[in-house]
Image (cartoon, helix red, strand yellow):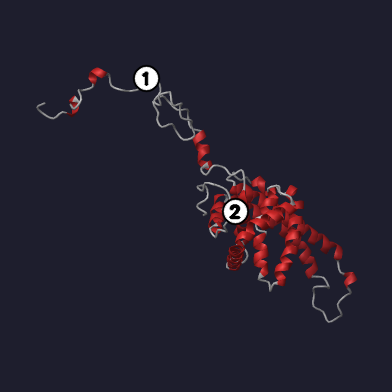
Amino acid sequence: MSVAYGYKPYYGPTGRVDFGWINEAWDIFKRDAGIWIAAMAVYWGILIVVEIPFQLSMSGSKYMTPTTTPTPPLQNFPWVPFSLLEVFMIVAELFMGASLLLMALKAVRRIPLTFGDAFSGARLMGPLFCFAFLASLFNILGMLALIIGMLFTTALLLPGYALIADGDSITGAFNRSLNAMKADWVRAGGFVFVGWLLSALAQVFTCGLGAVVVVPMTLIVAVLAYRDMVGMHGIQEPNFPFQQQAYAQPPMQPGTWPPPPGQQQPPYSQPPYGSPSSQQYPPPSAQPPYGQQPPDQQGPGT
C-alpha cells in the first residue's frame, strides 16, 4: 500500500499492482518539482531550436506550398536534411528518456536529485533503445487483439524500463518484468488504462503543457512498479531527509536523555544521564522525609 513519499518503510515486493502509485508518483515529483520542470524545459528548448528552422524552410518550399502544378518527384525531396533531423530527434528523445528514468530511480530510492542528473543518460541510451524496440514488437501482439491487448502488453513490461536503468540485461529485464506482472495482469491492464486516460486529460486541458508533469510521473510509476512487483534494493531509510539534519546536531551533553535523533544510545552498563557527578539531584540533607512535602510547598501553619 502506497503512502506519502518519505514515510513508507520498504519490506520488499508486494506482488500487487497498486493504484496508489499515481498519488505516490505525484508526491515524489513535487519534492523535486523544480529540477524536473527545468530538465523538461531544457529538453524542449533544444528540440524547438533545432526543429523550427527546418520547418520554416520547408514551409516556403515547393513541397509545402499549394500549387496547381504537378507535385515534384520524390527524388527531389530534401531527404538528407529531413533524415538528419529525424535521427537527431530520436537521439535527443532517447537521451531525455534515459536521463529522466535514472532520475526517477534515484527519487524512488530517496536520494536527493541535482540538475546535473538531467544529463546523465548517455550510458543508458543503447540498452534502453534495444529494450524499447523489443517492447514495441511485443506490443504488436497487443494490437492484433483489437488494440485492447496493448493495455496488457504495456502493463506486463512496465517495470522493465526501470530494470534496464538499474543495470539489468535486456532479456533479463524482459523476463523479470513479464514474470512479476503476469500474476496480477488484469489489474495491471486496468491500471495502464487509467494512466492513459489521466495522461490524455492532463495534456488536453493544458494544451500539451501537462507533459512537463506527465512524462516524469510516468517514469516514476515504472520505478514504483519495479519496486513493488519485482523488488528493488538500495532504498534509503524512510526518514532519510530528516536523518541528514539529525547528523548535523551537536554532540550529546551529559545529563541529556533520551539522546537526540541519529545518536547512539550508551551501553546498557553505563548510566544514561552521564557520570554521577554531573547528575543534578538535590543533596540528601535537603530532601524531606518520605510522605512530607518540601518546605516551599507546605501550607500555612506547618
Residue 251 placement (x, y as % from top left):
47, 27
Q: Left of 31 or right of it: where is 294?
A: left
Name the residue carrying label 1: 276
Is label 1 in contact with label 2 (beta carbons under 8 Å)? no
Q: Residue at x 63, y 65 (%)?
A: 208
In this view of the protein, can residue 276 be seen by the observer?
Answer: yes
Occupied quadrant, residue 82: bottom right
Q: Residue furthest left?
A: 301
In this view of the protein, can residue 92 be seen by the observer?
Answer: no
Mark 1 is surrounded, within 10 Å at the Cα level, by few (under 14), some (14 to 19) or many (20 or more) other residues, namely few
Residue 282 placement (x, y as % from top left):
28, 21
Q: Secondary structure at mark 1?
A: helix
Q: Left of 56 or right of it: where is 234?
A: left
Q: From the viewer's perspective, is residue 217 above or below residue 250?
A: below
Q: Secondary structure at mark 2?
A: helix
Q: Residue at x 68, y 48 (%)?
A: 166
The dot on residue 224 is: 2
Residue 181 placement (x, y as % from top left):
63, 58
Q: Amino acid at mark 2?
A: Leu
Q: Residue at x 59, y 44 (%)?
A: 235
Occupied quadrant, residue 197: bottom right
Mark 2 is surrounded, within 10 Å at the Cα level, by few (under 14), some (14 to 19) or many (20 or more) other residues, namely many
Residue 113 placement (x, y as % from top left):
61, 45
Q: Amino acid at mark 1?
A: Pro
Q: Quadrant of the C terminus?
A: top left
Q: From the viewer's perspective, is residue 215 above or below residue 143?
A: above
